[in-house]
């Protein structure tokens, strides 16, 4: 799959593609990421990419023409039917379902906005999807783009050392969408706290039952909406429901 990043600050990604296990996806081009800078398509002596907002008010707005020319250049290579995603506070909230959808796609053009926003006429003309990292505002679309690409890269075959790692993650749609259970490692005793006895028992059936119950407990306490979602999809067993009834 190929993702074309449209950003005024391509240098922000220089280390992102080179560290951590997900670098395997980028280095092998399993997730092929290419960067383009709208400033390279700006006109005039100063190559401006932003200007004051009509109607007055604080902040600057990214101009439509440099963005349009930049995206058009990419779409000429890829095809006009390529999806174009803008990271925006008013977009659909990013969740595992969104990630799974794009992780199975051929890719998209990713636009990283800056300043007060992007000229709405460009959005109307070019953007096909808008995605939000959450109900808060960051300085630009680069951070949401990194989160988006990292989430996609880690579920690609062969990227993680153990592919079950992503299957058992919190929110994993292939499982049931519940939160993950607690995890422990050596030493067995740390600052007066011990590892739960069941995890030391070597009894795999008991361990799996404990982990399942912990996932249900964590989710019921912290994200009860995910319990209802799993229930509505028929993903909770009779044993699950019996355990939840005891909470």
Image (cartoon, rainbow, N blue to C red):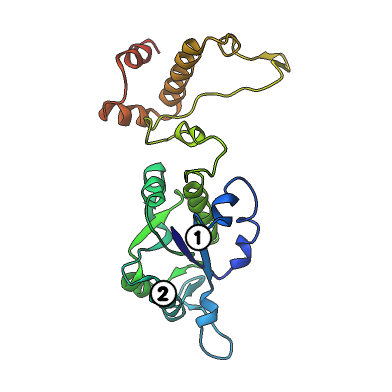
Residue marked by disc 2: 77
Q: Quadrant of residue 182?
A: top right
Image quadrant in which the N terminus is located:
bottom left
Rendered location of residue 31, percent (x, y): 49, 55
Circle 1 — which element?
strand
Q: Is residue 137 visible?
A: no
The tag earlier along the polypeptide, 2 or 1, is 1
* Residue occupying the point 48% across, 52% down: 148
Residue 200 x %, y % = 61, 11
In the displayed structure, 171 sits above or below 214; it is below
Quarter residue 201 falls in: top right
Q: Is residue 200 left or right of residue 104?
A: right
In the image shown, does 152 or 48 lie closer to the viewer?
A: 152
For image coordinates 37% across by 15% down, the residue present is 244
The residue indicated by pointer 1 is 32
Residues at discs 2 and 1 in contact (Cβ within 8 Å):
no
């Amino acid at each position: 799959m190929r993702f074309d990043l449209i950003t005024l600050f391509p240098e922000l990604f220089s280390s992102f593609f080179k560290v951590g296990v997900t670098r395997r996806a980028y280095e092998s081009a399993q997730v092929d990421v290419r960067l383009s800078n709208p400033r390279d398509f700006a006109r005039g002596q100063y190559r401006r990419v932003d200007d004051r907002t009509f109607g007055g008010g604080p902040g600057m707005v990214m101009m439509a023409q440099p963005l349009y020319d930049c995206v058009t250049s990419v779409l000429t290579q890829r095809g006009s039917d390529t999806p174009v995603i803008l990271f925006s506070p008013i977009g659909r909230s990013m969740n595992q379902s969104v990630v799974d959808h794009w992780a199975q796609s051929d890719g998209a053009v990713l636009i990283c906005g800056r300043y007060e926003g992007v000229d709405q006429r460009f959005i109307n003309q070019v953007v096909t999807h808008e995605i939000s990292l959450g109900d808060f505002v960051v300085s630009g679309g680069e951070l949401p783009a990194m989160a988006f690409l990292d989430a996609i890269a880690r579920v690609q075959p062969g990227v993680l050392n153990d592919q079950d790692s992503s299957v058992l993650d919190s929110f994993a749609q292939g499982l049931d969408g519940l939160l993950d259970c607690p995890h422990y490692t050596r030493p067995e005793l740390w600052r007066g706290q011990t590892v739960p006895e069941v995890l030391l028992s070597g009894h795999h059936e008991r361990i799996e039952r404990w982990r399942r119950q912990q996932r249900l407990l964590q989710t019921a306490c912290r994200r009860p909406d995910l319990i209802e979602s799993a229930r509505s999809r028929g993903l909770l067993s009779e044993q699950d429901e019996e355990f939840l009834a005891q909470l």
